[in-house]
Image (cartoon, helix red, strand yellow):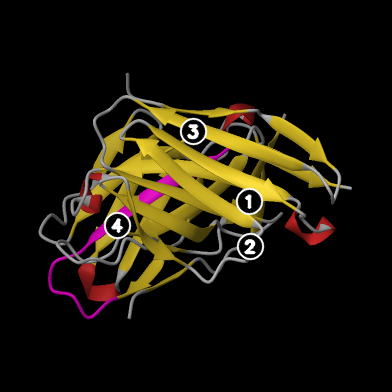
Amino acid sequence: DTEVTQTPKHLVMGMTNKKSLKCEQHMGHRAMYWYKQKAKKPPELMFVYSYEKLSINESVPSRFSPECPNSSLLNLHLHALQPEDSALYLCASSQVGRGNYGYTFGSGTRLTVV
Amino acid sequence: AQKVTQAQTEISVVEKEDVTLDCVYETRDTTYYLFWYKQPPSGELVFLIRRNSFDEQNEISGRYSWNFQKSTSSFNFTITASQVVDSAVYFCVTPPQSGGSNYKLTFGKGTLLTVNP
């Protein structure tokens, strides 16, 4: 497998809901990432996991809670989101310390907060 | 600090035209890499090419070609005989320095290419 799978593809949630985004890869990559992308903007890094441990949090609000239960899975738990959190959420993976070899991105989850 | 500039925000062409997307980069590293990604309307970022600073050979892959010039700090991307399926946002990207703990990719702002039939 040379892909990153994200579910769901689309999600609509209310501001009081709790939901989770899921990401899975089977390339043996031990670095996994969450990116947020607003319309007509490049992706912005949110979190980085390296060997299943959180290594970077780009000052993301606590209503976003990442989790890496094992080397293949990455979750993003969402709670009490705001309408401005509506965006495309992209998961990516790479080899640790060897990002020069490239990052593989999933197709994303389009999140709408109402 | 690394920086990638894509001065073209939007480009519109008619099918079969050739089109070049510009990318200018800034880095203090002597060893560095550059990528191009394609993002179609579906949202997935598709990896197109990786180039390192030691290899200035131009590369061709089908209708795609890349011109890497260290003298002008540019890594331009040309699509020959464009097709409607080439319509997408294209990002020029540079990864963090090899071996560093900073995993942050540096993206250009992207160029929206629209190919009209």
Q: Which residue is mark 2?
A: B9
**A111 to the left or right of B39:** right
Look at the picture and state if B5 lies above or below A29: below
Which of the marked residues, 2 or 4, is nearer the chain's N terminus? 2
- Alpha carbons under labels 1 and 2: distance apart: 6 Å
Above or below, A25 against B96 in this view is above
Marks 2 and 4 on same chain: yes
The region drawn magenta spans B27-40
Residue A57 position within the rendered picture, expressed as x and y whole percent measured from the top left: 45, 65
Residue B23, image x, y percentages: 42, 63
For badge 4, the amino acid type reads Leu
Q: How far apart are labels 1 and 3 at the CA level? A: 27 Å
Residue B116: x %, y % from top left? 72, 35
Residue type at mark 1 is Leu
Displayed quadrant of residue B52: bottom left
**Mark closest to the chain's N terminus, 4 or 1:** 4
Between the C-alphas of marks 3 and 4, the distance is 26 Å
Q: Are marks 1 and 2 on the same chain?
A: yes
Q: Earlier in the sequence, mark 1 or mark 2?
A: 2
Measured Cα–Cα span from mark 2 to mark 4:
19 Å
Residue at the (47%, 45%) spot, across then down: A67
Residue bearing the label numbered 1: B112
Q: Are marks 1 and 2 in contact (CB under 8 Å)?
A: yes
Q: Looking at the rendering, in which quadrant would you find the N terminus of chain B?
A: bottom left
- Name the kind of residue labelled 3 in the image: Cys
Name of the residue lying farthest toward the top = A1
